[in-house]
Amino acid sequence: MQTDPTLSREKCVRCGTIDFILPLFNIVDFVPVGANGYTIHEKRIDGKLHCEDGPAVIITGYSNNIVEMSWWVNGALHNENNWAKITISDHTITLAKYVNGSLSSDTSPALVTIDKSGRVVASTWFKDDIEHTSKPEVPSFVSYYPSGAPHMKRYMTDGILYRDPRKGAACVVWSEAGEIEYMTYSKLKPVLPTT
């Protein structure tokens, strides 16, 4: 197999085929997984999944196409500055941010699903595995219909459905035609600043 030495890891990951990334990946194990045709490529140090300069796990499918890649440090899913887990199915790509094994991100959604055309299907903010956004104007979960119309918006803080009622509902579900099908407000009383 010939590889282009000018290809960066990022270009290899984007191309979506294992033939381009494997030459850059120090494979430790090739583990066939049953009769389903998937193969797991792992990199371990001292028995723990670990790789500081690329994915520690790559799962390939029937045609050597990448099905999943994940970045691990000391046995925990972790990639502080980027996606730690990328899962590719026939119709969607799911991107997840993990910090020290927890689904978490302070700067953007920690879990995003996009369709093959690149359109966002759903996005969710998490902090330490709990649905959460610290930005009150930003919903913690948003999903969209295939047309691109919003399907649902939900506001969660520390796993609790909450949005200041003066700003709107804490959860809204729309029909594809744009009509509100469901709406609920937070059951909690807002904490108002004292002056």
Image: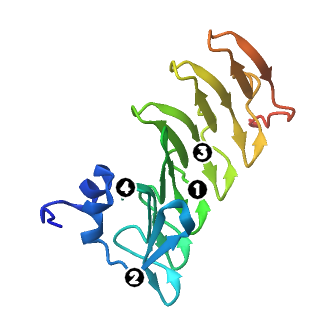
- Callout 4 environment at 10 Å: few (<14), some (14 to 19), or many (20+)? few
> Which of the 4 image quadrants contains residue 71?
bottom left
Label located before the other in sequence (1 or 4): 4
Element assignment for label 4: loop
Q: CA distance from mark 2 to mark 3?
A: 34 Å
- The answer to whether marks 2 and 4 mark residues whose Cβ atoms lie closer than 8 Å is no
Q: Element at badge 3? A: loop
Q: Residues within 10 Å of mark 2 (few under 14, many from 20)?
A: few
User: Does label 3 or label 1 sit earlier along the sequence?
Assistant: 1
Residue tagged 1: 104
Q: Which residue in the protein does label 2 denote? A: 28
Q: Amino acid at mark 1?
A: Ser
Identify the mark at residue 63; answer none if there is no mark: 4
Foreground: 18 or 145?
Answer: 18
Q: Dividing the image into 4 quarters, which one contains the N terminus?
A: bottom left
Q: Amino acid at mark 4?
A: Ser
| Labels 4 & 3 near each other (Cβ < 8 A) | no
Identify the residue at image location x=54%, y=69%: 33
Q: Which residue is mark 3?
A: 125
Along the polypeptide, which appears first: circle 4 or circle 3? 4
> Which residue is drawn at the image coordinates 81% and 26% (left, top)?
185
In this rendering, does residue 35 appear at all? yes
* Quadrant hosting residue 142: top right
Work out which quarter of the rendered image holds the C terminus and state it.
Answer: top right
Q: Which amino acid lies under the numbered mark 2 shown in the image of this protein?
A: Val
Q: Secondary structure at mark 1?
A: loop
- Which residue is outermost to the front? 35
Q: Residue 192: give x, y in percent of width and height.
A: 77, 34
Real-space Cα separation, disc 4 to disc 3, in angstroms: 34 Å
Decide if residue 146 is on the left or right side of residue 140: left
Measured along the vertical axis of the image, is residue 181 above or below residue 48? above
Q: Nearer the viewer, mark 1 or mark 4?
A: 4
